[in-house]
Amino acid sequence: MMPGMTLSRLLLLACLALIPVHSALANAPAKEGGKEEEAKGPQFIPVGPLTVPIIRNGKIYQYVRISVKLEAKDGADAAQITERVPSLNDAYLSNLYGAFYVGEGMNGPLVDLEKIRKRLEVANAKVLPTGVVQNIFIQQVSQSQR
């Protein structure tokens, strides 16, 4: 044993070292006969977080940070979304940038979530085949002063 290390500390360190291994094994798809089994049921793919400016008098007034999850009906659609996440991030930022001005695209002092959702749907249509995304779940929206 190392000087100053108690048995409980050593056990704690050993457990902490095994967490990533256990997590990776728990999330791995099951294999049957050497083939990976496709995930069944709805799948949720995280996209973001995205940071978009709110403009006031031609200058950045605030920032909005948005995290979303896209719902796919099965593993095959989830794979299509996952492989296109970088393109989705780009399409989302392009579609949301400049969409929010103080007084426009806002719901009082807050961004309009329905406007965000509609713009994300338009971006999805540019990157993904129709019907791959079943729903867009806006997980987190936070606004911060510049």
Image: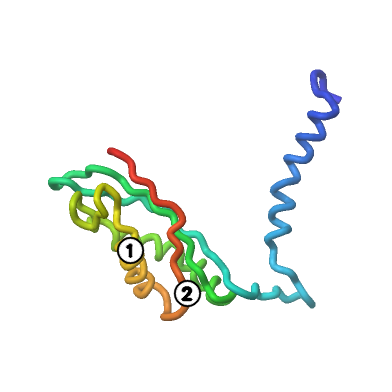
The amino acid marked with disc number 2 is: Gln
Residue 114 is labelled as 1
Position of the C terminus, as image quadrant, is: top left
In this picture, residue 85 sits left or right of residue 117: right
Residue 8 location, x and y as percent?
A: 82, 29
Which quadrant of the view contains residue 75? bottom right
The vertical placement of 93 against 64, above or below, is: below
Residue 86 location, x and y as percent?
A: 43, 62
Label 2 SS? loop
- Give the labeled residue for mark 2: 134
What residue is shown at x 46% (from left), y 70% (from top)?
135
The amino acid marked with disc number 1 is: Glu
Position of the N terminus, as image quadrant, is: top right
Label 1 SS? helix
In this picture, residue 98 sits left or right of residue 7: left
The vertical placement of 97 against 12, above or below, is: below
Residue 70 location, x and y as percent?
A: 48, 66
In this picture, residue 28 sits left or right of residue 141: right
Number of other residues with Cα within 10 Å of mark 2, as a class: few under 14, some 14 to 19, many 20 or more:
some
In this picture, residue 142 sits left or right of residue 111: right
Q: Residue furthest top?
A: 4
What residue is shown at x 34% (from left), y 69% (from top)?
123
Residue 24 is labelled as none
Residue 145 location, x and y as percent?
A: 29, 38
What residue is shown at x 69% (from left), y 55% (from top)?
24
Number of other residues with Cα within 10 Å of mark 1, as a class: few under 14, some 14 to 19, many 20 or more:
few
Q: How many numbered marks are there?
A: 2
Circle 2 or circle 1, nearest the eye: 1
Q: Residue furthest left?
A: 57
Mark 2 and mark 1: span between their CA atoms? 16 Å
The vertical placement of 16 against 135, above or below, is: above
- Mark found first going from the N terminus, 2 or 1: 1
